[in-house]
Image (cartoon, rainbow, N blue to C red):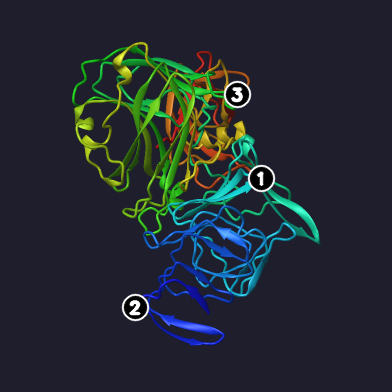
Amino acid sequence: MTYIGKKPENITASVNAPSGTFSGEVDAGSLDISGNADIDGTLEADAITINGTAIASVLSPIAGSSSIVTTGALNAGSITSGFGNIDTGSSTITTTGAITGGSLVIDNITIDGTEIDLSSGDITLDAALDIKLDAAGGDIKFLSDGTEFGEFRNISNDLVLISSVNDKDIVFKGQDNNSEITALTLDMSDAGKAIFTGDVQVPSINGGQIGGRRNIIINGAMQIAQRGTSVTGLGASGGFFTVDRFKMDFSQSDGRFTMSQSTDAPEGFGNSIKLACTTADTSIGAGEIALFQHMIEGQDLQQFKKGTSNAEKMTLSFYVKGNGNATYVYELYDNDNGRQISKTFSVTSSWTRVVLTYDGDTTGAFDNDNGLSLYAQIWLHAGSNYTSGTLSTTWTAQTAANRAVGISSFYSSTDNEFYITGLQLEVGSQATPFEHRHFSDQLRDCQRYYVRAGGANYANIFGTGGIANTTGSWFGFGNIPVPMRTGFTLILSGGTPRIQNGQAGFNASSVSASQIANQSFPGSPSAVISMGCNASGLTLYRWHNMDAGASAALFELDAEL
């Protein structure tokens, strides 16, 4: 080995040809090494030339890292190093540690004896175990010719795949019978619509059955209105007035409104319920209320598993609009256990779909019978008895002050209007599209709670016929479309019915009716009712039918909750 310059006093050297081993420091004007150099420490020099190629400078370690900076490509046979930014041209780098820093431009890479071959333009990673990509909190991005087209993100430990180019799809492909196929396309130009190439096998929708009925609300499209299509002056006493299965409840307010079945409805619907304020009430007493209600039997709610550790969430969805901005509360009230949960929703002057999801309740099961178990009701107006607390947004025992906190008052102005349709209540946390059903199906569901006959001169009453069992009384049988929920109440109004035998008619009084349990006409889903009345001048045992008479008597059978 040859070295030129003064040998410092702190060097201890021994030379074993053709190599030399030194410990300590070498401080020399120049150092000429014709073979290999293995340096464990730091090499500081003004200039380095390797195989005729000059390296501009070598920087000392800074903050625990080093780098080699060259004026051109590093053309060397082999370098063993832990350096950062290295441009090797067509040479080879072998490292025993990590290469960190800016960029590495090379032709071939060998990692632990496995070559990554770049000669054909492809990269092949061949590892005996896992290959891991760690972005250290960043994203893993995919580029083509420098343009990003997709990425993987970690969002709260969810793996998120993103198509980075506007309106470009995410496509899932595979091999089927040795041919490439497209299994699924997510159409990003159409809000991510999923397009499947083949059949779709889905075990459930929203955690429930695929077929059958998902919507627990009856007449949610507001199509059936047996009682009539418009009633004015409402607000003093509650009841069912227009659209079937929807009730209004009031207390103490002087506000008044008109309720009607409207044809103003969002796309895909033909009807809505419209409420229009006709008398304002801006001096709100503490006990005032105005409620829009739908009531549900317990036996229709068992799928929610309420009162169990597996209680299901409930999702309520509907379309709503008003004359302007307003806020109301949709409350679910458990009538069996005195428990409540409430959610606010906003109304604007345009039709919007509202989706409200309520947690499952592990306390208090719904009764499994035909009684009233659940009120699904909107608070439209309320006094301080119901608004002075904190809104119960989780299931809790009833506290009156927490039921309607934060609502507007529907009675604040005679300009106020409220429209609603497309009401749906279903199991789970997702709102599915509204379940449209045939008009005839909805009508039969409504007739389980209410049915009517008559209302026109001499109209037949439920097809009822029978015999005079005395000269002053008559008894007969008729049929109604479906068995009613429970024993109904007969409401007779509008005039005097009669019984007639084809030759003469007789005014009826003391009319009665009742449902005969578990009886129907052969081949018909209808139910049998019995009717009776008093009349004068009857011929014993002669057959008579009942009708509405000349004054258009109206018969209503009411089995509402």
* Local crowd size for mark 2, using a 10 Å CA cut-off: few (<14), some (14–19), many (≥20): few
**Mark 3 lies on residue:** 501
Where in the figure is residue 152, as x and y percent of width and height? 54, 51
- At mark 1, the secondary structure is loop
Please state which amino acid type lies under the numbered disc 1: Asp
**Total marks drawn?**
3
- Viewport quadrant of the C terminus: top left
Q: CA distance from mark 3 to mark 2?
A: 142 Å
Residue 250 lies in what quarter of the image? top left
Which numbered disc covers residue 9? 2
- At mark 3, the secondary structure is loop
Where in the figure is residue 355, as x and y percent of width and height? 45, 36
* Local crowd size for mark 3, using a 10 Å CA cut-off: few (<14), some (14–19), many (≥20): some
Residue furthest to the bottom: 16
Where in the figure is residue 88, as x and y percent of width and height? 61, 60
Residue 472 at least partly seen: no
Do tag 3 and tag 2 residues touch (Cβ < 8 Å)? Answer: no
Looking at the image, which is closer to me, 306 or 190? 190
- At mark 2, the secondary structure is loop
Which numbered disc covers residue 145? 1
Residue 371 lies in what quarter of the image? top left
Residue drawn at x 61%, y 70% is 78
Looking at the image, which is closer to me, 169 or 456? 169
Q: Is residue 455 above or below residue 441?
A: above
Please state which amino acid type lies under the numbered disc 3: Asn
| Eye-nearest disc, 3 or 2 | 2
